[in-house]
Image: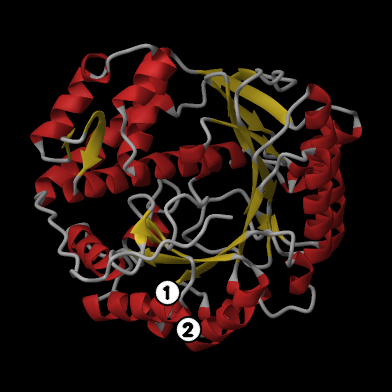
């Protein structure tokens, strides 16, 4: 794992976000247009993943689609937990990994998401052990959990297997937790704090996930969340904006979400509080080291392969979608087939725009990357995108490196908005893929 780099705390950070509300709203509308255009369900059927290409590096994603309770603002692919179905699913997940191995893949990293990945810690441990045996190049394993499982008897089985555990806290404020129906499910803020403190010794990296943009989340509430997270002294803190999708608009926008105009002020407060304590890894992720993995694995890996029901893969400029039907997934694996059943190919310009989005979000926008990956001059190939970002002061040239572009605080704000809309679009796709499911599919 990376060595810890302590940031310079001599000067307090003073975020310079000058983008007006109308510009923020405009960027959201532009992103919604591109997301609606490019994340359409105009896929074709697929039966098999492609073979790996020599010299490319890949990341393995595994999806665990079970939760004990379903949060109203979440549209990730998940089902209510039933132990018999979950145990059968983990067995199928390992069989699908065998099929991936047979294609010739190896992976540098593994990310396990959900759902709640830790619903059955023994099965999860077996699955990680199996993956490491199949794919010996895996250097690190990242995993998600909610606070409920941190003190369960089986949680310690993951020690030595998981390098980075990301814990969905959302807020330490009891009013926010009550409003989002989390306090009865996972305990109050202090109980969550105590559970994380006890679990810290189990994993090299603990990440604390927070969400901002809730109704009633005043500056004092946000600062309390940040202070509580800082007292835990985790290696990473992630501060997601609340995301509103077509499916959650009724349950979130009118009941849970703060006014849109609060976002820039809240984000400025987050930047000022965490920069100096942490290095900024992306628009919303902060870490003690500059070069360790984090939730947005798509930044570190251009290509990733997903196993499990509802997982996505991006290979050779093609998006592959595994079946969202739990029944169909189990049937496919039992018949010796992989879980994938849809695919969509993207054009060169669309892929470049996607990489531009990731570069803005991660603060790693590089002319050299576009020259070496696509054989283009970034300034001319994406003239419209580059010109608009320069005009609003989101990017500027690095005086020490002509290939590098500096993402300003305005740029971080734009990167956050762009990624928020992209993820909201992906959530809409998930919801549309889940919509046809019947009781027998779950």
Q: Nearer the viewer, residue 73 or 121?
A: 121
Residue topped by disc 1: 171
In the displayed structure, 65 sits above or below 178; it is above
Residue 351 shows up from this direction: yes
Q: Position of residue 38 (x, y in %)?
A: 41, 25
The quarter of the displayed image where residue 126 is located: bottom right
Residue drawn at point x = 49 percent, y = 39 percent: 300
Left or right of 339, for residue 168: left
User: From the viewer's perspective, is 78 left or right of 7?
Assistant: right
Label 2: state its secondary structure. helix
Viewer-closest of 248 and 392: 392
What residue is rendered at 75% in x and 43% in y? 326
Q: Position of residue 25 (x, y in %)?
A: 18, 45
- Above/below status of 408 relative to 223: above
Q: Residue furthest right?
A: 335
Callout 2 environment at 10 Å: few (<14), some (14 to 19), or many (20+)? many
In this rendering, would 203 be left or right of 40?
A: right
Q: Image point 43% across, 84% down: which residue?
A: 174
Label 1: state its secondary structure: loop
Residue 21, given in percent of the width and then of the height, sits at 12, 51
- Give the residue at x 87% y 59%: 84
- Where is mark 2, residue-wise? 189
Task: Classify residue 269 by image quadrant.
Answer: bottom left
* Left or right position of 319 against 405: right
User: In whole angstroms, how far apart are the C-alphas of marks 1 and 2?
Assistant: 7 Å
How packed is label 1: few (under 14 Cα within 10 Å), some, or many (20 or more)? many
Q: How many marks?
A: 2
Question: Which of the two labelled residues, at mark 1 and mark 2, occupies the earlier sequence position?
Answer: 1
Q: Are marks 1 and 2 in contact (CB under 8 Å)?
A: yes
Residue 232 in the image: above or below residue 335:
below
Q: Is residue 242 visible?
A: no
């Amino acid at each position: 794992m990376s060595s810890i780099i302590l940031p310079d705390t001599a000067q307090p950070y003073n975020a310079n976000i000058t983008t007006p509300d109308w510009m923020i709203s405009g960027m959201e509308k532009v992103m919604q247009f591109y997301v609606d255009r490019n994340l359409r369900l105009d896929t074709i059927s697929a039966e098999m993943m492609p073979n790996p290409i020599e010299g490319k590096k890949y990341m393995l994603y595994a999806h665990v689609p079970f939760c004990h309770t379903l949060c109203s603002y979440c549209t990730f692919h998940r089902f209510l937990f039933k132990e018999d179905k979950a145990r059968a699913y983990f067995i199928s997940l390992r069989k699908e990994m065998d099929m991936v191995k047979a294609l010739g893949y190896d992976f540098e990293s593994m990310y396990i998401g959900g759902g709640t990945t830790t619903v059955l810690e023994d099965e999860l441990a077996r699955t990680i052990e199996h993956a490491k045996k199949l794919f010996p190049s895996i250097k690190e394993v990242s995993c998600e959990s909610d606070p409920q499982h941190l003190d369960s008897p089986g949680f310690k089985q993951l020690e030595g297997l998981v390098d980075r555990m990301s814990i969905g806290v959302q807020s330490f404020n009891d009013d926010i937790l009550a409003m989002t129906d989390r306090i009865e499910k996972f305990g109050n803020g202090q109980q969550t704090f105590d559970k994380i403190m006890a679990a810290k010794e189990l994993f090299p990296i603990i990440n604390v996930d927070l969400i901002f943009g809730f109704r009633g989340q005043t500056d004092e509430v946000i600062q309390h969340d940040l202070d509580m997270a800082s007292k835990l002294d985790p290696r990473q803190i992630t501060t997601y904006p609340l995301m509103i999708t077509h499916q959650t608009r009724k349950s979130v926008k009118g009941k849970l979400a703060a006014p849109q105009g609060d976002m820039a002020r809240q984000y400025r407060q987050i930047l000022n509080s965490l920069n100096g304590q942490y290095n900024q890894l992306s628009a919303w992720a902060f870490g003690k080291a500059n070069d360790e993995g984090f939730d947005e694995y798509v930044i570190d890996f251009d290509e990733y392969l997903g196993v499990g029901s509802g997982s996505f893969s991006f290979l050779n400029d093609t998006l592959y979608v595994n079946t969202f039907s739990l029944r169909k997934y189990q049937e496919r694996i039992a018949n010796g087939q992989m879980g994938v059943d849809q695919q969509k190919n993207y054009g060169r310009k669309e892929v470049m725009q996607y990489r531009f989005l990731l570069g803005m979000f991660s603060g790693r926008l590089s002319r050299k990357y576009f020259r070496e990956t696509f054989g283009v001059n970034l300034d001319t190939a994406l003239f419209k995108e580059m010109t608009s970002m320069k005009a609003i002061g989101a990017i500027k040239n690095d005086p020490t490196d002509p290939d590098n572009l500096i993402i300003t605080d305005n740029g971080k704000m734009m990167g956050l908005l762009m990624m928020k809309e992209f993820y909201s679009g992906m959530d809409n796709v998930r919801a549309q893929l889940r919509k046809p499911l019947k009781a027998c599919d779950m």
